[in-house]
Protein backbone atom coordinates (compact mmCIF):
# COMPACT_ATOMS: atom_id res chain seq x y z
CA UNK A 1 0.00 0.00 0.00
CA UNK A 2 1.29 3.44 -0.89
CA UNK A 3 1.55 6.52 1.29
CA UNK A 4 -1.94 7.44 2.44
CA UNK A 5 -3.18 10.98 1.87
CA UNK A 6 -5.49 12.26 4.61
CA UNK A 7 -7.77 15.29 4.76
CA UNK A 8 -5.02 17.55 6.12
CA UNK A 9 -3.20 17.27 2.78
CA UNK A 10 -5.91 19.40 1.15
CA UNK A 11 -7.82 20.78 4.10
CA UNK A 12 -9.69 23.54 2.26
CA UNK A 13 -11.80 20.94 0.45
CA UNK A 14 -13.48 20.06 3.73
CA UNK A 15 -13.78 23.55 5.21
CA UNK A 16 -17.25 25.13 5.27
CA UNK A 17 -15.72 28.56 4.69
CA UNK A 18 -14.83 27.47 1.16
CA UNK A 19 -17.99 26.99 -0.87
CA UNK A 20 -16.13 26.62 -4.18
CA UNK A 21 -13.03 24.61 -4.82
CA UNK A 22 -11.33 24.60 -8.22
CA UNK A 23 -10.09 21.39 -9.79
CA UNK A 24 -6.71 22.07 -11.36
CA UNK A 25 -6.77 19.40 -14.03
CA UNK A 26 -6.72 19.62 -17.80
CA UNK A 27 -10.12 19.76 -19.45
CA UNK A 28 -8.84 18.14 -22.63
CA UNK A 29 -6.30 15.36 -22.90
CA UNK A 30 -3.12 16.40 -24.68
CA UNK A 31 -2.03 13.64 -27.08
CA UNK A 32 0.65 15.37 -29.16
CA UNK A 33 2.60 12.12 -29.49
CA UNK A 34 -0.05 10.79 -31.88
CA UNK A 35 1.00 13.40 -34.46
CA UNK A 36 4.63 12.30 -34.79
CA UNK A 37 4.78 8.52 -34.37
CA UNK A 38 3.02 5.46 -35.78
CA UNK A 39 1.06 3.72 -33.01
CA UNK A 40 0.42 -0.01 -33.11
CA UNK A 41 -1.01 -2.52 -30.66
CA UNK A 42 0.85 -5.70 -29.78
CA UNK A 43 0.05 -8.78 -27.73
CA UNK A 44 3.51 -10.27 -27.31
CA UNK A 45 6.23 -9.78 -24.71
CA UNK A 46 8.38 -7.86 -27.25
CA UNK A 47 8.47 -7.05 -30.96
CA UNK A 48 11.42 -7.90 -33.17
CA UNK A 49 11.64 -6.50 -36.69
CA UNK A 50 14.04 -6.96 -39.59
CA UNK A 51 14.28 -5.51 -43.09
CA UNK A 52 15.17 -6.71 -46.58
CA UNK A 53 16.18 -4.57 -49.55
CA UNK A 54 15.18 -4.66 -53.21
CA UNK A 55 17.54 -5.29 -56.16
CA UNK A 56 18.38 -1.66 -56.92
CA UNK A 57 19.09 -0.69 -60.54
CA UNK A 58 19.11 -2.91 -63.62
CA UNK A 59 22.36 -3.59 -65.48
CA UNK A 60 23.12 -3.22 -69.16
CA UNK A 61 22.92 -6.55 -71.00
CA UNK A 62 24.85 -7.15 -74.21
CA UNK A 63 23.23 -9.14 -76.97
CA UNK A 64 23.66 -12.86 -76.35
CA UNK A 65 24.99 -12.33 -72.83
CA UNK A 66 23.54 -13.47 -69.53
CA UNK A 67 22.14 -10.92 -67.10
CA UNK A 68 24.06 -10.08 -63.97
CA UNK A 69 22.70 -11.73 -60.85
CA UNK A 70 21.36 -9.42 -58.17
CA UNK A 71 20.58 -10.19 -54.58
CA UNK A 72 18.28 -9.22 -51.76
CA UNK A 73 20.29 -7.68 -48.92
CA UNK A 74 19.21 -8.27 -45.31
CA UNK A 75 18.82 -5.16 -43.20
CA UNK A 76 19.21 -4.61 -39.49
CA UNK A 77 17.15 -6.05 -36.65
CA UNK A 78 15.31 -3.86 -34.18
CA UNK A 79 13.81 -4.87 -30.84
CA UNK A 80 10.85 -3.17 -29.19
CA UNK A 81 11.03 -4.06 -25.49
CA UNK A 82 7.89 -3.01 -23.63
CA UNK A 83 8.19 -1.06 -20.39
CA UNK A 84 5.62 -0.85 -17.61
CA UNK A 85 4.46 2.61 -16.52
CA UNK A 86 2.12 3.38 -13.64
CA UNK A 87 1.22 5.24 -10.49
CA UNK A 88 -1.09 4.69 -7.52
CA UNK A 89 -3.01 7.07 -5.29
CA UNK A 90 -4.12 6.13 -1.76
CA UNK A 91 -6.69 8.22 0.12
CA UNK A 92 -8.05 7.86 3.63
CA UNK A 93 -11.64 6.82 4.16
CA UNK A 94 -12.46 10.27 5.54
CA UNK A 95 -10.83 12.11 2.62
CA UNK A 96 -13.25 10.40 0.25
CA UNK A 97 -16.35 10.32 2.44
CA UNK A 98 -16.09 14.01 3.40
CA UNK A 99 -15.50 15.19 -0.18
CA UNK A 100 -18.56 17.44 -0.23
CA UNK A 101 -17.46 19.36 -3.33
CA UNK A 102 -16.66 16.13 -5.26
CA UNK A 103 -13.20 17.47 -6.04
CA UNK A 104 -11.35 14.35 -4.92
CA UNK A 105 -13.97 12.10 -6.48
CA UNK A 106 -13.69 13.78 -9.86
CA UNK A 107 -9.89 13.82 -9.83
CA UNK A 108 -9.74 10.07 -9.20
CA UNK A 109 -11.94 9.11 -12.15
CA UNK A 110 -10.43 7.16 -15.04
CA UNK A 111 -10.59 10.15 -17.38
CA UNK A 112 -8.63 12.43 -15.04
CA UNK A 113 -6.00 9.92 -13.92
CA UNK A 114 -5.32 8.51 -17.39
CA UNK A 115 -4.29 12.03 -18.41
CA UNK A 116 -1.04 11.25 -16.58
CA UNK A 117 -0.56 8.39 -19.02
CA UNK A 118 -0.93 10.66 -22.04
CA UNK A 119 1.50 13.12 -20.44
CA UNK A 120 4.00 10.27 -20.06
CA UNK A 121 3.56 9.12 -23.66
CA UNK A 122 4.24 12.69 -24.83
CA UNK A 123 7.36 12.85 -22.67
CA UNK A 124 8.64 9.43 -23.73
CA UNK A 125 8.25 10.18 -27.45
CA UNK A 126 9.90 13.61 -27.06
CA UNK A 127 12.76 12.08 -25.07
CA UNK A 128 13.31 9.40 -27.70
CA UNK A 129 13.31 12.04 -30.44
CA UNK A 130 15.98 14.15 -28.76
CA UNK A 131 18.04 11.10 -27.78
CA UNK A 132 18.32 10.22 -31.47
CA UNK A 133 21.37 12.49 -31.48
CA UNK A 134 23.14 10.39 -28.84
CA UNK A 135 21.68 6.86 -28.77
CA UNK A 136 22.61 4.18 -31.30
CA UNK A 137 19.99 2.70 -33.61
CA UNK A 138 19.80 -0.70 -35.28
CA UNK A 139 22.71 0.04 -37.64
CA UNK A 140 25.10 0.83 -34.78
CA UNK A 141 25.17 4.58 -35.47
CA UNK A 142 23.26 7.27 -33.61
CA UNK A 143 19.70 7.36 -34.94
CA UNK A 144 20.49 10.81 -36.35
CA UNK A 145 24.01 10.62 -37.74
CA UNK A 146 26.13 11.70 -40.69
CA UNK A 147 27.43 8.15 -41.30
CA UNK A 148 24.62 5.60 -41.61
CA UNK A 149 25.66 2.51 -43.63
CA UNK A 150 23.43 2.27 -46.71
CA UNK A 151 22.82 -1.38 -45.81
CA UNK A 152 24.29 -4.23 -43.77
CA UNK A 153 26.65 -5.33 -46.58
CA UNK A 154 27.91 -2.09 -48.19
CA UNK A 155 28.85 -0.42 -44.92
CA UNK A 156 31.37 1.80 -46.71
CA UNK A 157 28.52 3.57 -48.53
CA UNK A 158 26.79 5.95 -46.11
CA UNK A 159 24.05 8.52 -45.94
CA UNK A 160 23.37 11.36 -43.50
CA UNK A 161 20.17 12.37 -41.73
CA UNK A 162 21.97 14.91 -39.51
CA UNK A 163 21.40 18.59 -40.28
CA UNK A 164 23.43 21.47 -38.90
CA UNK A 165 22.49 24.87 -37.58
CA UNK A 166 19.50 26.64 -36.13
CA UNK A 167 16.07 26.63 -37.76
CA UNK A 168 16.33 29.28 -40.48
CA UNK A 169 15.11 29.54 -44.04
CA UNK A 170 18.64 28.93 -45.35
CA UNK A 171 19.17 25.88 -43.14
CA UNK A 172 15.78 24.45 -44.10
CA UNK A 173 16.78 24.86 -47.76
CA UNK A 174 20.07 23.07 -47.02
CA UNK A 175 18.13 20.31 -45.27
CA UNK A 176 15.92 19.90 -48.33
CA UNK A 177 19.00 19.51 -50.52
CA UNK A 178 20.43 16.98 -48.12
CA UNK A 179 17.24 14.94 -48.10
CA UNK A 180 17.10 14.90 -51.91
CA UNK A 181 20.66 13.53 -52.05
CA UNK A 182 20.47 11.08 -49.13
CA UNK A 183 16.92 9.73 -49.13
CA UNK A 184 17.87 6.33 -50.52
CA UNK A 185 16.77 2.77 -49.87
CA UNK A 186 19.10 -0.04 -48.85
CA UNK A 187 19.58 -1.01 -52.50
CA UNK A 188 20.83 2.48 -53.35
CA UNK A 189 17.73 3.64 -55.24
CA UNK A 190 16.01 6.92 -54.38
CA UNK A 191 12.93 6.69 -52.19
CA UNK A 192 9.89 8.53 -53.50
CA UNK A 193 9.28 11.69 -51.46
CA UNK A 194 5.56 11.16 -51.06
CA UNK A 195 3.28 11.68 -48.09
CA UNK A 196 4.48 15.16 -47.21
CA UNK A 197 6.81 16.22 -44.42
CA UNK A 198 6.48 17.27 -40.81
CA UNK A 199 8.61 20.00 -39.29
CA UNK A 200 8.68 19.02 -35.60
CA UNK A 201 9.70 21.83 -33.26
CA UNK A 202 9.75 22.74 -29.57
CA UNK A 203 7.45 25.59 -28.61
CA UNK A 204 10.41 27.95 -28.40
CA UNK A 205 10.67 27.87 -32.21
CA UNK A 206 7.04 28.79 -32.91
CA UNK A 207 7.80 32.29 -34.14
CA UNK A 208 10.68 31.18 -36.34
CA UNK A 209 8.65 28.38 -37.91
CA UNK A 210 5.72 30.74 -38.47
CA UNK A 211 7.99 33.27 -40.17
CA UNK A 212 9.47 30.64 -42.50
CA UNK A 213 6.19 28.99 -43.43
CA UNK A 214 3.97 32.05 -43.76
CA UNK A 215 6.10 34.85 -45.28
CA UNK A 216 5.29 35.49 -48.93
CA UNK A 217 8.91 36.51 -49.48
CA UNK A 218 12.00 34.79 -48.15
CA UNK A 219 12.51 36.30 -44.67
CA UNK A 220 15.01 39.17 -44.96
CA UNK A 221 15.25 39.00 -48.76
CA UNK A 222 13.99 41.47 -51.42
CA UNK A 223 10.34 41.32 -52.45
CA UNK A 224 10.97 39.46 -55.70
CA UNK A 225 12.55 36.49 -53.87
CA UNK A 226 9.49 34.33 -53.29
CA UNK A 227 9.30 31.94 -50.35
CA UNK A 228 8.52 28.49 -51.72
CA UNK A 229 7.51 27.23 -48.28
CA UNK A 230 4.64 29.71 -48.04
CA UNK A 231 1.22 28.10 -48.25
CA UNK A 232 0.26 29.58 -51.62
CA UNK A 233 3.72 30.02 -53.13
CA UNK A 234 5.21 26.53 -53.12
CA UNK A 235 2.63 24.52 -55.04
CA UNK A 236 4.27 22.15 -57.47
CA UNK A 237 7.74 23.08 -56.20
CA UNK A 238 7.87 21.46 -52.79
CA UNK A 239 6.19 18.64 -50.94
CA UNK A 240 3.98 20.40 -48.37
CA UNK A 241 5.05 20.74 -44.75
CA UNK A 242 2.98 20.35 -41.61
CA UNK A 243 4.44 22.17 -38.62
CA UNK A 244 4.06 20.16 -35.42
CA UNK A 245 4.49 22.22 -32.26
CA UNK A 246 5.54 19.43 -29.87
CA UNK A 247 5.50 21.19 -26.52
CA UNK A 248 6.97 18.29 -24.55
CA UNK A 249 10.05 18.52 -26.77
CA UNK A 250 10.84 21.89 -25.17
CA UNK A 251 11.79 20.02 -21.99
CA UNK A 252 14.53 18.27 -23.96
CA UNK A 253 15.80 21.14 -26.11
CA UNK A 254 14.80 24.69 -27.01
CA UNK A 255 16.71 24.65 -30.30
CA UNK A 256 16.46 21.18 -31.87
CA UNK A 257 14.26 20.69 -34.93
CA UNK A 258 13.30 17.61 -36.89
CA UNK A 259 11.90 16.68 -40.28
CA UNK A 260 9.78 13.55 -40.41
CA UNK A 261 9.21 11.82 -43.72
CA UNK A 262 5.56 10.94 -43.19
CA UNK A 263 4.39 7.52 -44.29
CA UNK A 264 7.67 5.63 -43.84
CA UNK A 265 6.27 3.66 -40.85
CA UNK A 266 9.69 3.31 -39.24
CA UNK A 267 9.26 5.42 -36.08
CA UNK A 268 6.86 3.33 -34.00
CA UNK A 269 5.19 3.07 -30.61
CA UNK A 270 3.84 -0.37 -29.70
CA UNK A 271 1.12 -0.44 -27.03
CA UNK A 272 1.43 -3.76 -25.22
CA UNK A 273 -1.13 -2.80 -22.60
CA UNK A 274 -3.44 0.15 -23.09
CA UNK A 275 -3.74 2.81 -20.41
CA UNK A 276 -6.17 1.57 -17.80
CA UNK A 277 -7.58 2.71 -14.45
CA UNK A 278 -8.38 0.63 -11.36
CA UNK A 279 -10.11 1.51 -8.10
CA UNK A 280 -10.46 -0.64 -4.97
CA UNK A 281 -11.06 -0.40 -1.22
CA UNK A 282 -8.84 -1.75 1.56
CA UNK A 283 -10.39 -2.54 4.92
CA UNK A 284 -7.65 -2.24 7.54
CA UNK A 285 -7.00 0.62 7.61
CA UNK A 286 -9.91 1.71 5.44
CA UNK A 287 -8.47 3.38 2.35
CA UNK A 288 -9.58 4.06 -1.18
CA UNK A 289 -6.98 3.13 -3.77
CA UNK A 290 -6.67 4.18 -7.38
CA UNK A 291 -4.13 3.34 -10.05
CA UNK A 292 -3.37 4.06 -13.67
CA UNK A 293 -0.93 2.00 -15.73
CA UNK A 294 0.11 1.03 -19.23
CA UNK A 295 2.89 -0.77 -21.06
CA UNK A 296 4.58 0.29 -24.28
CA UNK A 297 7.81 0.54 -26.27
CA UNK A 298 9.28 3.15 -28.63
CA UNK A 299 11.93 2.58 -31.26
CA UNK A 300 12.81 3.22 -34.89
CA UNK A 301 13.27 0.30 -37.28
CA UNK A 302 15.33 2.50 -39.58
CA UNK A 303 16.97 5.93 -39.59
CA UNK A 304 15.36 7.12 -42.82
CA UNK A 305 12.16 8.57 -41.36
CA UNK A 306 13.46 11.13 -38.84
CA UNK A 307 16.06 13.78 -39.77
CA UNK A 308 17.20 16.54 -37.48
CA UNK A 309 19.48 19.20 -36.10
CA UNK A 310 20.34 20.01 -32.50
CA UNK A 311 20.01 23.66 -33.51
CA UNK A 312 23.65 24.36 -32.81
Image (spheres, rainbow, N blue to C red):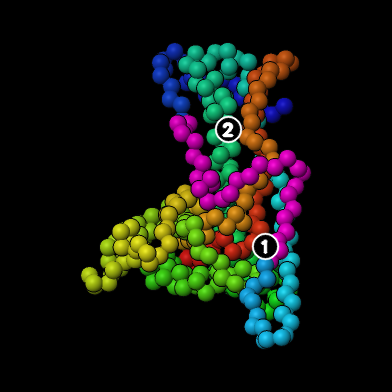
Q: Closer to the camera, 269 or 119?
A: 269
The residue located at (63%, 15%) in the rendering is 93
Magenta residues, start to end: 25-53
The residue located at (70%, 42%) in the rendering is 42
Mark 1 residue element: loop
Q: In this figure, which residue is indicated by the disc labeled 1?
A: 137
> From the viewer's perspective, is 222 left or right of 273?
left
The residue located at (50%, 21%) in the rendering is 103
| Position of residue 24 measured from the top left corner of the image (x, y, whole percent) | 46, 30
> From the viewer's perspective, is 94 left or right of 223?
right
Nearer the N terminus, badge 2 or badge 1? 2
| Position of residue 228 measured from the top left corner of the image (x, y, whole percent) | 34, 66
Please say whether residue 44 is one of the residues in the magenta stretch: yes
Q: Closer to the camera, 71 or 19?
A: 71
Q: In this figure, which residue is indicated by the disc labeled 2?
A: 114
Cα–Cα gap, marks 2 and 1: 31 Å
Q: Residue furthest right?
A: 45
Image marks 2 and 1: residues in contact by CB distance under 8 Å: no
Please say whether residue 261 is one of the residues in the magenta stretch: no
The answer to whether residue 211 is above or below residue 163 is: above
> From the viewer's perspective, is 308 left or right of 207?
right
The answer to whether residue 117 is above or below residue 164 is: above
The residue located at (43%, 62%) in the rendering is 239
| Position of residue 119 measured from the top left corner of the image (x, y, whole percent) | 55, 41
Q: Quadrant of residue 234?
A: bottom left
Mark 2 residue element: loop
User: What crowding class fits label 2: few (fewer than 14 Cα within 10 Å), some (14-19), or many (20 or more)?
Assistant: many
Q: Closer to the camera, 154 or 58?
A: 58
Q: Closer to the camera, 215 or 201?
A: 215
- Quarter of the picture holding the N terminus: top right
The answer to whether residue 97 is above or below residue 156 is: above
Whether residue 206 is visible here, answered yes or no, is yes
Amino acid sequence: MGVQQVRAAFADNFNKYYDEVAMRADKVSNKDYLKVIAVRTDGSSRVDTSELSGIGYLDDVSEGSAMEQGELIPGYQTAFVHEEKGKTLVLSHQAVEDDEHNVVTNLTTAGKMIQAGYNTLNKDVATYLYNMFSVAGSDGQYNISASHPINSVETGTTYSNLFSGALTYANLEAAEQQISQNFKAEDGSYIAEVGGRQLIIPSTLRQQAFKIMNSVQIPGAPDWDKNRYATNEGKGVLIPYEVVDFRELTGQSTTAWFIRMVGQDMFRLYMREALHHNAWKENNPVTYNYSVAGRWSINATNAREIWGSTGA
